[in-house]
Image (cartoon, grey):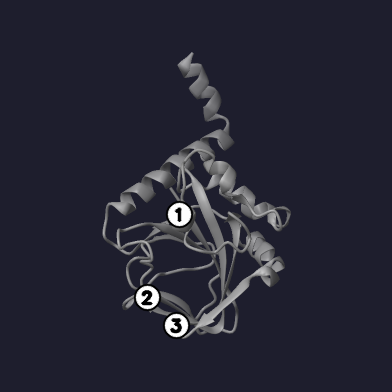
């Protein structure tokens, strides 16, 4: 019976793709946490052009952030506790019970991003998906060198997905540039010092994914 089940699944490409990729993404995330390198690429297909169209359609909802360390930075929360609930995901931690009910697609935009939601149905780098933030960096914008250590310095992983990445946009760890291109994604240890600059004439759109 097991052989028959496996043979039937062999010809179900959707079953194989989903199960194989999910396991691979989660295993890669766990291994990255055990290392020391500040970033590592995840290779997974994504419809970045379709997703970019969706991001542009909801861009006007993003909340702008500018201070002495940043310029031209804005963001919104596609999946989490609410569209403009943008604090560290650790600020929202709680009992695992009810986890999936507390982290959900934001009601205001869920119907506007079908390609993005379908992508995350397939791409699962974490067992439990928390926040997915859309972050825009305008031309001439920057985020100065810093570490994300509001909740301690222990190594942790976020997934940074380039919906686009115009030439002239760079994320750096020291002198090392993360080789983003449109449609690529990297695991990032944001507790290590990093910076971002947009020296292009286009807005940069990336998705930042937190999970457990």
Name the residue beneath numbered marker 2: 146
Report x, y in % for residue 124: 49, 46
Report x, y in % for residue 98: 54, 40
Q: Is residue 93 above or below residue 51?
A: above
Q: In the figure, residue 156 lies in which quadrant?
A: bottom left
Name the residue beneath numbered marker 1: 43
Observer-side mark, 3 or 1, equals 3
In the image, 35: left or right of 92?
left
Name the residue beneath numbered marker 3: 69
Name the N-terminal-most of marks 3 and 1: 1
Tag 2 secondary structure: strand
Report x, y in % for residue 33: 32, 53
Mark 3–mark 1 Cα distance, whole angstroms, equals: 32 Å
Q: Residue at x 32, y 78 (%)?
A: 175
- Who is closer to the viewer here, 69 or 159? 69
Q: Which residue is drawn at 35% across and 47% down?
A: 30
Tag 1 secondary structure: loop
In the image, 1: left or right of 195?
right
Mark 2–mark 1 Cα distance, whole angstroms, equals: 27 Å
Question: Would you say the residues marked 3 and 2 are in contact, meaning their CB atoms lie under 8 Å apart?
Answer: yes
Name the N-terminal-most of marks 2 and 1: 1
Question: Would you say the residues marked 2 and 1 are in contact, meaning their CB atoms lie under 8 Å apart?
Answer: no
- How busy is the neighbourhood of tag 2: few (under 14 within 10 Å), some, or many (20 plus)? some
Tag 3 secondary structure: loop
């Amino acid at each position: 019976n097991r052989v028959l089940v496996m043979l039937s699944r062999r010809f179900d490409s959707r079953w194989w793709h989903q199960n194989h990729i999910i396991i691979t993404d989660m295993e890669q995330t766990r291994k990255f946490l055990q290392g020391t390198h500040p970033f590592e690429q995840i290779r997974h297909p994504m419809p970045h052009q379709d997703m970019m169209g969706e991001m542009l359609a909801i861009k006007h909802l993003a909340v702008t952030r500018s201070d002495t360390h940043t310029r031209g930075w804005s963001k919104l929360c596609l999946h989490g506790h609410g569209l403009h609930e943008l604090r560290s995901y650790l600020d929202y931690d709680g009992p695992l019970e009810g986890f999936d009910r507390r982290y959900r697609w934001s009601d205001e935009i869920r119907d506007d991003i079908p390609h993005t939601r379908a992508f995350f149905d397939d791409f699962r780098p974490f067992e439990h998906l928390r926040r997915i933030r859309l972050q825009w960096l305008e031309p001439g914008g920057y985020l100065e060198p810093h570490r994300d250590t509001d909740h301690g310095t222990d190594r942790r992983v976020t997934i940074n997905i380039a919906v686009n990445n115009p030439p002239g946009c760079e994320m750096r760890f020291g002198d090392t540039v993360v080789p983003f291109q449109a449609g690529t994604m990297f695991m990032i240890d944001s507790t290590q010092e990093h910076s971002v600059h947009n020296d292009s004439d286009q807005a940069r759109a990336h998705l930042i994914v937190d999970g457990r």
